[in-house]
Each structure stands twice: as structure tokens, then as C-alpha cells.
Amino acid sequence: MEHTLEALQRTATFAGISRDALGFLLEKSRMLTVPAGHVFFTEHDHGDTFYLIEEGRVGIHKTKGGVRREVGELGAGECFGEMALLSVSDRSGTVTALEPCVCLELSNRSLLELYRVDAGQFAMIMMNLGREVCRRLRDLNDRLLSDLVVARGAGLELEGDCTGAGLGAKDTG
């Protein structure tokens, strides 16, 4: 458990969180070891768990109108599933192991229990998760702007809503 506590403290999600709070969460979490190709969850599934990657890489994709779009990849020290915890909504994408992975799985119920025993540490984790979501939103905005510039430079007219999943292009030449 000591190794896992130290690994958690090095992540953006759990930065600044006390050893006691992390120990509390670790007692209520489980470690998953999965092979490459394992699907953690699918877009639109109900979400009530969060994952922190200790080893391996995952890929994230979204599908809209039958078109699959790769959204990104995450590796050791990064998390996924946080949007479902923050927004109490369905999964926004599909996450698949690109290689064998070891992940910590933490439920929203465990976080709620932490809130009951230490609201301050709970608030810090939520703030850290919010920062991570904001960082990813900025990255996505940059990627979309780059796609837009490249498409227009190539003489393509964009179709859809330019949200990434709906971004399409047709040749106007």
C-alpha cells in the first residue's frame, strides 16, 4: 500500500491530499489488472467509477453519426472517468486498454464516504479533478482550432458542430 500511496500523491488528482485521506480511499478501492483490448466502459454507459492508471495506456474515442473519432490517449499517473463523477452523467466516451493496464478503480460512493469524514480533503480532490477537466478542455479547444485551420487551409468546408465528434470536412475544390 505504501507504493500506491506514493504513486497517488504524485498525480495531479491527488496532489496535496493527506496520507490519511488517501489511505481511506485505498481501503475502499480496488486494483484492476486488464489485458490490452479490455473495454473499461462504453460511451453512454452509466458512470459511477473513476480510474487512475498505474501502468499501461488507454485510448479514448467517441462515436457520432456512425463515425468514430479518437479523442486521446492516457498513461501512468493519469485518470479517466472523472467527468461522470463530477457531472453525475453518462460516460462521454469509450475507454479501451491499448496495452496491459493496472488501474485503481474508485467509486463515487467511496468519495462520498470521504466527504462525510473529511470534507476538506474531498473538496481538494474535487478541485483537482475540476482542474484536470479544464486542462483537457483547453487541449481539446487547441486541437479543434488546429483542425479548423488545417481544414480551411486545405480548401475544405467544415460540416457539423466542430465539437470534435461532429467535426467533418468536405472538399470544396
Image: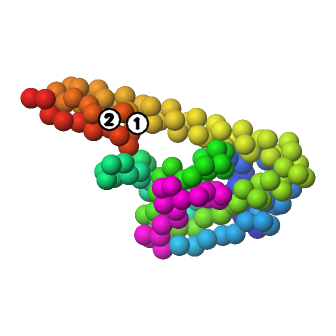
Amino acid at dot 2: Gly
* 103 to 135, vertically: above or below: below
Work out how far the residue at label 2 is from the one at label 1, CA to CA, in angstroms.
Answer: 8 Å
Say which quadrant the N terminus sits in: bottom right
- Residue shown at 41% from the left, 51% from the top: 62
User: Residue 102 lies in what quarter of the image?
Assistant: bottom right
Mark 2, other Cα within 10 Å: few <14 / some 14–19 / many ≥20:
few
Q: Secondary structure at mark 1?
A: loop
Secondary structure beneath dot 2 equals loop
Way the structure is coloured: rainbow
Task: In the rendered view, tell whether residue 149 sits above or below residue 127.
Answer: above
Whole-percent x, y for residue 35 in the image: 48, 74
Q: Tell me residue 173's x, y (percent).
A: 9, 29
**Magenta region: which residues?**
35-52
Residue lying farthest right?
117
Q: Which mark is residue 160?
A: 2
The answer to whether marks 2 and 1 mark residues whose Cβ atoms lie closer than 8 Å is yes
* Residue 137 position within the rendered picture, expressed as x and y whole percent measured from the top left: 52, 35
